[in-house]
Image (cartoon, grey):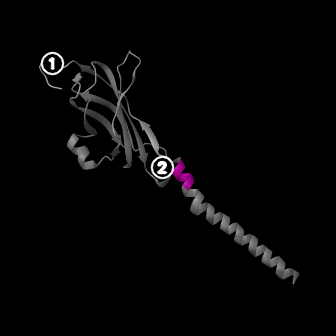
Amino acid sequence: MATYIRDLQMINRSAFKSFIVGFSVLFIGPIVYMSLDNSPPYTFHKGELIPNPATSGQTVDVIWEYEVHRFCSGIVYRRIIGPIGSGAAIVHNYDPTVAVINPRIAQQSGPNKLVVTFSLPPSTSPGEFIYSATIEYNCNPLQAIFPLKVQLPQVPFGVRDRPIGQKK
């Protein structure tokens, strides 16, 4: 009887060890892998705002040069900061937008170029400003909770007075 109990204890220990190993492989391993997945899916090298200088309320384009490493979706937070030299502050926050680089859209803009079009706020006074954007990527399930945040290069640009007679 004592041998039987000892055998049961050994089986229970063996089952417990197998459970721990299985749990580690099935649950902890993927979580560790996802937490180490921190390389940005795209590298944005530089951006240029056209036309530069612009006028307040004008529709402008930011042309980004970028490199694709993999395809992930994300949310873009964009803002205008300035005027530079007078205690720069956020002048305007744009609504967050979904960020997905579709290969077809990217080809229309040119090789490794992405064009983002938006309007400057009508109340923007003349001066030097910065267009700034941060993207929060969601490349795996863990990043749905803790997104991968990437700050894009800042794009300086100028705002000039409207020509006389031009409507706001």
Which comes before the other along the chain, label 2 or label 1?
2
Residue 160 location (% of width, % of height):
23, 18
Q: Residue at x 29, y 35 (%)?
A: 64
Is 72 inside the magenta-drawn segment? no
Judging by the rendered image, the residue that carries numbered circle 2 is: 143
**Boundaries of the magenta span:** 31-35
Q: Is residue 31 above or below residue 76?
A: below
Place residue 65 in its image quadrant.
top left
Place residue 163 in its image quadrant.
top left
Q: Nearer the viewer, mark 2 or mark 1?
A: 1
Instruction: Please name whichever residue, 120 or 165, is drawn nearer the observer in this view of the structure.
Output: 165
Is 34 inside the magenta-drawn segment? yes
Place residue 62 in its image quadrant.
top left
Q: Is residue 6 above or below residue 129?
A: below
Residue 100 location (% of width, % of height):
33, 47
Q: Quadrant of the C terminus?
A: top left
Q: Is residue 45 above or below residue 33?
A: above
